[in-house]
Amino acid sequence: MVTVLRQSEWTTSRQAHVERVERLVGDYLRDRASGAYHPVLDFLFTYYSYKPGHLKRWNPGYGVVLTGERAHDYADLASYEPTEGGFAVRESLLDRRRSAIEFILGLLSATRDRQPNLGCFGLHEWAMVYRGGKSALRHGSVPLRLGHTGTDDVVDSMKLKCTHYDAFRFFTDAAAPRNALELDSSGRTAREQPGCVHASMDLYKWSYKLSPLVDSRLVTDCFELALAARTVDMRASPYDLTAYGLDSIRIETPEGRAEYVRAQSDLSNRAAPLRSALIARCENLLVSGGAIVGPTAE
């Protein structure tokens, strides 16, 4: 099934998308141009490989034909091809991305079907500096709230229960053996669970890895969630971010742990419909090879 959009329809959607991304990151990009550092947004454009220009580019998703003279804006993009009446994402791209789609579908489906685990208290950032000294600091210009000794004491007093390999792999050598689970990349699908802040954050990664087969609205929805998740992540970290307007979630206290669980649960609830939407996109792409009709107009 193919959806055909008139120029007036898709250009309106594209403009709305550009304005939305500008509201989200415009000030940050202007500050970054002057050399400013931001512990939340820098991460979203360095750890994740999708650049601001990619995020700003509007894509309607696979199976959508853009018509009108303005459709030639997509003529020079390698992922688009001319079709009868306009331009659309290349059909061959679906075959080239098939293995990625299958992996993402399997991972997200397994994650969705598990009970959320809300007992980690965001200790992964603490474990990344545990007994590592200054060389282990991942945000060198940002001080530790409790200093090195105080940070180590918090990790010593609590259990590490990380389920997310891509956080665990940055643990210091002293912290890794303290984790309740031995994690490796091959066990990602077997361990990922929906209560994990990073599992919510990574919906952005999986959405943009499917772009332009997946529409930009969903990618940006996932980016907004990643922004919220990374904010919680850093507020619960051992770093003092008051200079960036972020108050700390003091997970070393009972009150702070309760606050973190509430934030973690909220992120998990927000992630659920986005995860389901990505699963549906993958199923559509794999099973029917058809268009994603509903979300193309914003």
Image: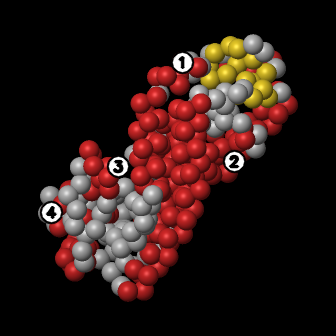
Disc 1 marks a residue whose amino acid type is Ser
Displayed quadrant of residue 183: bottom left
Residue 27 image label: none
Give the residue at x 22% y 62%: 181
* Helix, strand or loop at mark 3: helix
Q: Is residue 94 left or right of residue 59?
A: left
User: Mark 2 or 1 closer to N-term?
Assistant: 2
* Helix, strand or loop at mark 1: helix
Spatial CA distance of label 2 from label 4 is 43 Å
According to the picture, the residue beneath numbered tag 1 turns out to be 92
Residue closest to the eye, 226 or 179: 179
User: Mark 1 or 3 closer to N-term?
Assistant: 1
According to the picture, the residue beneath numbered tag 2 turns out to be 20
* Helix, strand or loop at mark 4: helix
Q: Is residue 135 left or right of residue 235?
A: left
Residue closest to the eye, 294 or 235: 294
Disc 3 marks a residue whose amino acid type is Thr
- List x then y, in percent, for residue 58: 66, 34
Within-10-Å neighbours for mark 4: few <14, some 14–19, many 20+: few
Disc 4 marks a residue whose amino acid type is Pro
